[in-house]
Image (cartoon, coloured by chain):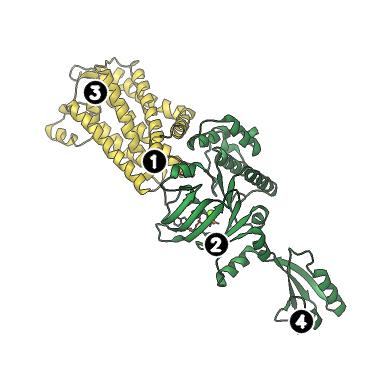
Chain colours: A green, B yellow
């Protein structure tokens, strides 16, 4: 598949001496939705800021739509729209003025029809004459999206688009992002929510402490992430996992009071009901049960601690 | 040249001016007019003429120069400081626009506003004081050049400042005293020789002197020196702007 963004051996060391990005190699495919996952301080915003021209790279090469972001910054940047993580907007401008300003700033001739369409798509049309400071936080975030879309970019960066956004609006945004993808826009988003990545992304990259730990298609990654645990708090402690339950992947806690069953939530048959039935037959009584999904946190821990081969590309 | 980008910044900045027209236009016009009332109409009639020019008329070039310097610096510094402060600078930095174009947009708008103010004050002065302009083209050229030059300085200050008080320091603590002591209210040869020498170290003297020459043909220093000094300022501030962008000083990490 054709790459719309190519990143080769990108490094960033801030003036403070802190190295925020280490040898990043990454290709973003034309037309995909790419989710960048990582804990706080992982370097997601730094990576995006470099591609968009807000932060200077220390070394390495980045091309957007075939143009070098430094030597051909005009061509490269005119293809890119950015919705930054921080909500920073003008206060006294109207929605209409600020979105048209963005289009002009990106060197495009005025096109009121396009701006109208963008505002309508984002349910901002009614608010076009409102001053930005009169809008709610969720609306402001949509204004920032409208600004980023005002110049018809081929590549859209969304840095934590759904932070502090309510469930309904989040669904709307996902819908909008999908719509953009259908129009051929490549979308790169960062998020802390695995659910969001699962819902949206075609491919997922995991970044931690400035290193890209893995890049993988969503489906294969979700199989890894899809592990779930069922924990049963027993009334009476067991000495060992009962013999005829051995074909289930069961583990017993040290004190013998907790039985842990790992299963794959993506599977049709998780084997839970069968397990519970067998426990009943054996007379093993339990007072509580809960399930736990392996979280992004677990994945990070696994990635950091195991000498996992980093899969890139 | 990226015409639409420059236009966007320029119009955005001008819109800010019109939105705050009371503060950005009315205030400087009124405060300068007070000088004309007090020194032109009231006290001025009791003051002796300076080189054949009434006192009220004598101070007009200096007072306009004061407004031009103050307004150019504060407009341009505020214009670039605000997006830095609010975080909206991200958009300008990520736009397909060269540094030169950014500067043309911001500095152009700030200078335009100063020029408009200068002209308004000139017209207002007419209501209080009788004056004439010997060299209108020179006068207007000085007006434009000074506005542009000090808008560059304002731009530099706006980038340098990391708080609102720093925006105020240069206009209030440096420019105002220099203008007041730079021959706005008196001719330099009214001073004792020693203080004449000291005054010539004040760069604003050359600006006021040149500007006054364009009105009345009177000057403390030769007009060529004034022109050279104005371009000298321009060169210095341009170099600073160039250096800021070359190094990304306080704009990009
Ligand atoms: N201007 C700067 N100077 C020095 N260090 C910085 C600067 N900006 C960011 N950093 C550091 O670089 C690291 C990566 O920051 P970055 O903002 O890219 O993280 P992130 O993955 O976006 O985190 P979050 O999920 O919290 O948004 C952090 O440790 C941060 O403290
Ligand atoms: Mg971030």
Helix, strand or loop under label 1 = helix
Which residue was labeled with disc 4? A241
Q: Are marks 3 and 1 in contact (CB under 8 Å)?
A: no
Q: Which image quarter: residue B168?
A: top left
Which of labels 3 and 1 is toward the front? 1
Which of labels 2 and 3 is toward the front? 2
Q: What label sits on residue B99 in the rendered view?
A: 1
Q: What label sits on residue B212 in the rendered view?
A: 3
Cα distance in 3D space between marks 4 and 1: 70 Å
Whether labels 2 and 3 belong to a single chain: the reply is no
Q: Up-down: is B165 above or below A277?
A: above
Q: Which image quarter: residue B161?
A: top left
Looking at the rendered image, the quarter that the N terminus of chain B falls into is top left
Mark 3 or mark 1: name the one nearer the start of the chain. 1
Which residue occupies the foreground of this view, A211 or B159? A211
Cα distance in 3D space between marks 3 and 1: 35 Å
Q: Is residue B48 left or right of residue B91?
A: left
Helix, strand or loop under label 3 = helix
Which residue was labeled with disc 2? A312
Which residue occupies the foreground of this view, A311 or A283? A311
Q: Residue at the location (71% across, 79% down)? A: A253
Q: Is residue B214 left or right of residue B71?
A: left
Cα distance in 3D space between marks 4 and 2: 40 Å
Helix, strand or loop under label 4 = loop
Residue B223, position as x, y percentages in the image: 19, 26
Q: Dot 2: few (<14), some (14–19), or many (≥20) neighbours within 10 Å?
A: some
Chain for mark 2? A
Q: Is mark 4 within 8 Å of ligand 1?
A: no
Q: Are marks 4 and 3 in contact (CB under 8 Å)?
A: no
Residue A205, position as x, y percentages in the image: 58, 59
């Amino acid at each position: 598949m054709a790459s719309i963004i190519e990143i080769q051996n990108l490094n960033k060391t801030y003036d403070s001496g802190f190295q925020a990005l280490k040898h990043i190699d990454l290709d973003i495919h034309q037309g995909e939705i790419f989710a960048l996952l990582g804990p706080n301080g992982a370097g997601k915003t730094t990576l995006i800021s470099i591609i968009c021209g807000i932060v200077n790279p220390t070394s390495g090469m980045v091309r957007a739509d075939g143009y070098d972001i430094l030597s051909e910054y005009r061509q490269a940047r005119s293809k890119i729209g950015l919705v930054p993580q921080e909500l920073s907007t003008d206060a006294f401008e109207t929605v209409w003025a600020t979105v048209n300003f963005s289009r002009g700033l990106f060197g495009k001739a005025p096109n009121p029809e396009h701006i109208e369409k963008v505002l309508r798509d984002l349910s901002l049309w009614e608010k076009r004459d409102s001053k930005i400071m009169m809008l709610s936080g969720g609306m402001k975030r949509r204004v920032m999206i409208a600004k980023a879309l005002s110049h018809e970019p081929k590549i859209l960066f969304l840095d934590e688009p759904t932070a502090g956004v309510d469930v309904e609006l989040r669904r709307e945004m996902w819908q909008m992002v999908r719509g953009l993808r259908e129009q051929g826009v490549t979308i790169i988003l960062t998020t802390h929510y695995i659910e969001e990545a699962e819902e949206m992304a075609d491919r997922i990259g995991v970044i931690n402490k400035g290193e890209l730990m893995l890049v993988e298609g969503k489906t294969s990654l979700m199989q890894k992430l899809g592990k779930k645990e069922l924990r049963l708090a027993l009334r009476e402690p067991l000495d060992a996992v009962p013999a005829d339950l051995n074909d289930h992947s069961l583990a017993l806690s040290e004190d013998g009071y907790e039985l842990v069953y790992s299963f794959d939530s993506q599977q049709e048959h998780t084997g839970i009901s069968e397990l519970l039935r067998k426990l009943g037959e054996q007379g093993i009584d339990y007072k509580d049960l809960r399930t736990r999904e392996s979280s992004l946190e677990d994945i990070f821990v696994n990635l950091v601690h195991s000498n996992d081969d980093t899969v890139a590309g | 040249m990226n015409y639409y980008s420059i236009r966007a910044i320029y119009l955005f900045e001008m819109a800010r001016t019109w939105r705050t027209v009371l503060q950005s236009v009315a205030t400087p016009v009124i405060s300068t007019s007070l000088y004309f009332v007090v020194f032109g109409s009231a006290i001025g009639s009791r003051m002796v003429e300076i080189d054949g020019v009434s006192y009220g008329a004598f101070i007009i070039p200096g007072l306009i120069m004061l407004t031009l310097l103050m307004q150019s610096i504060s407009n341009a510094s505020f214009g670039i400081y605000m997006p830095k402060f609010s975080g909206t600078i991200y958009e300008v930095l990520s736009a397909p626009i060269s540094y030169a174009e950014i500067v043309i947009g911001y500095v152009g708008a700030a200078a335009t506003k100063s020029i408009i103010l200068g002209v308004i004050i000139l017209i207002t002065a007419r209501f209080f004081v009788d004056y004439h302009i010997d060299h209108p083209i020179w006068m207007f050229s000085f007006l434009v050049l000074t506005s542009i030059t000090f808008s560059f300085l304002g731009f530099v200050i706006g980038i340098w400042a990391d708080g609102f008080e720093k925006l105020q320091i240069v206009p209030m603590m440096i420019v105002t005293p220099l203008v007041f002591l730079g021959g706005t209210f008196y001719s330099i040869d009214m001073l004792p020789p020693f203080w004449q020498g000291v005054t010539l170290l004040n760069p604003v003297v050359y600006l006021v002197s040149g500007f006054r020459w364009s009105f009345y043909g009177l000057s403390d220093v030769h007009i060529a020196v004034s022109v050279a000094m104005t371009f000298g300022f321009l060169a210095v501030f341009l170099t600073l702007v160039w250096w800021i962008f070359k190094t990304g000083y306080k704009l990009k990490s």
